[in-house]
Amino acid sequence: MPLESASKRGEKYLHLELLRIIACFLVILNHTAGYINCFVYDKDYITIGLIWNLFIGMLVKINVPLFFMITGSLLLGKDRDYNYVFRKVLKTFGILLLFSIVANFCDQGHIYVPGFIRGFATAKVDGAGPYWYLYAYIGILLILPFMRSIASRLSTQDVAYIIIARVIITGLIPMIFLFLNVIMDTNIYIAEDFKPVIFTVDCVFYPLVGFGLDRLLDKDKLDKLKAFSFVLLFLGANVIEIFLTWIAGLDNVFRGFDFLMAIGVFMFIKLIMGKRAGEEPGKIGSFIAVVGGLTFGIYLLDPIVGNFLKPLIIGDGNNGEMLLLRSFAYCFISMAVCGFITFIYKKLRKK
């Protein structure tokens, strides 16, 4: 969840704000029983219902990649000194610690200090699972000066190279290995020591690609791109992952093309919202800007508020076909409640 405001001199980057809202919704949905149920299936054949559930399941996985891409666009555009880095790290750590304590207490009804310390160190505090992103965000901040050095020299050709390399390394090769494993009944996989970081580590890959796609593509290049082509990119990657997950088994979700789905959504929103840059946003744009500015508070509050809202809206997780629908309803209600609390807090803070 990017802590930076997607604005510059009072001008909101509406496409980034809308992406924040989409990603925040998907993060909340990711931690509902409806999402978990998307990968539960007891039949030997594929059905429309299963395809729909897997489609939603694959869609939800782009939540954090979108946040990483937004973070890259906002953070890598200019040099940051070490004072900035240390201040942001301390602030983020303080927020992480405070909300982990509150979320753990609301989930468990008490705080067991030894268990909390162990869970906090490993990002596995009961009730605070969604906060794992802040650990990754702190990691990004710590290497920010070095990532900025890369970003300052990045070209569109470099971005294309990074994306193509990832297609091969995390997409095509694992896909080939998957088919070989099924056909030959073996267990082939890429060597664990093969770690080309820029291509394979999410908290490095996505910020750099997000920065490149958002800041390096000039208007002439953007005009040649069609928003619909990125819809096809998203759908194609989603369908391929559905098929490969079905082949591998629902316990082995294939994630090799997640980044193509994230890029598809990121660029689609950028292209359809880009025409509003520098213009008055209008009522819809103003609403997007306001809600986008509340997403960090929504993200922090949902694990806490969810202890009270989920039993009322989702129930015990045994709602059958209505489970996913109830989970969607919960996401909207949670965003409204947590957004309202965040809005009031911001208003009071300004006084």
Image (spheres, grey):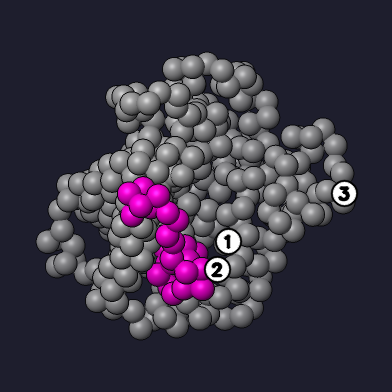
Q: In the shown orientation, is residue 72 left or right of residue 55?
A: right
Residue located 32% across and 28% down the image:
46
Regarding residue 72, the answer to whether it shows in the image is no
Looking at the rendered structure, the kind of residue marked 1 is: Ala
Residue at the disc numbered 3: 113
Task: Please identify, in this view, whether the residue under mark 2 or under mark 3 is nearer the observer.
Answer: 3
**Circles 1 and 2: CB distance less than 8 Å?**
yes
Judged left or right of residue 278, residue 304 is right
Q: Position of residue 12 (x, y in %)?
A: 38, 55
Residue designated by label 1 = 136
Left or right, 340 with respect to 72, comes to: right
Q: Is residue 302 visible?
A: yes
Q: Earlier in the sequence, mark 2 or mark 3?
A: 3
Q: What's drawn in magenta, residue-wise?
A: 180-206
Amino acid, disc 2? Ile
Q: Residues within 10 Å of mark 2 (few under 14, many from 20)?
A: many
On the image, the x and y values in percent for residue 240 come to 28, 46
Q: Secondary structure at mark 3?
A: helix
Q: Nearer the viewer, residue 21 or 11?
A: 21
Depth check, front residue: 146 or 76: 146
Under tag 1, what secondary structure? helix
Residue at the disc numbered 2: 140
